Amino acid sequence: MGADRSAIIEVVNWNVFKHKEQVYDLKHLRPYTAKYSRPAKGDDSAETYSVNITFSHHCFTRGLPKDGGPYDASLLFDHPGDPRIFDERR
């Protein structure tokens, strides 16, 4: 059997992350749909595929220190069930 295509995927429209006086715009990480076309070839007819592209908070955060060490709590990005630290370099 193939993959379960009935699974619900969480889609988040990221906006901004504010740290002190700095505002980080995350709107470029909003989901979008890309379409790809395969031309007809031989007995195969042309097909168009839609691919949903999404970005998780892992794109702009890093994990908490594994050793339980200190970190800047003002950078905490508390996504439900997965708290992480905002990382402007990511």
Image (cartoon, grey):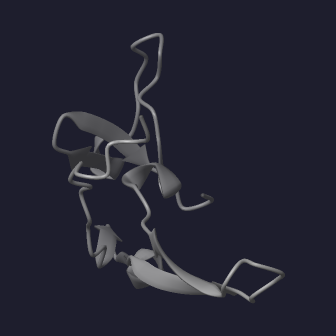
- Which image quadrant for residue 42? bottom right
- Which image quadrant for residue 33? bottom left
Q: How many marks?
A: 0
The answer to whether residue 9 shows anywhere in this view is yes
Question: Going 82% across and 83% down the picture, which residue do you hit?
Answer: 41
**Lateral position of residue 51 relative to residue 18, left or right:** right
Position of the C terminus, as image quadrant, is: bottom right
Q: Residue furthest right?
A: 42
Q: Residue furthest front?
A: 43
Decide which of 88, 48 is in the foreground and name it: 48
- Which image quadrant for residue 39? bottom right
Decide which of 85, 11 is in the foreground and name it: 11
Decide which of 27, 53 is in the foreground and name it: 53
43 up-or-down from 60: above or below? below
**Lateral position of residue 40 relative to residue 16, left or right:** right
* Residue 10 in picture, x, y percent from top left: 24, 57
The answer to whether residue 26 shows anywhere in this view is no
44 up-or-down from 9: above or below? below
19 up-or-down from 63: above or below? below
**Lateral position of residue 30 relative to residue 82, left or right:** right
Q: Residue furthest top?
A: 67
* Residue 43 in picture, x, y percent from top left: 76, 78
Question: Going 53% across and 84% down the picture, which residue do you hit?
Answer: 34
Position of the N terminus, as image quadrant, is: top left
Decide which of 79, 24 is in the foreground and name it: 79
44 up-or-down from 67: above or below? below
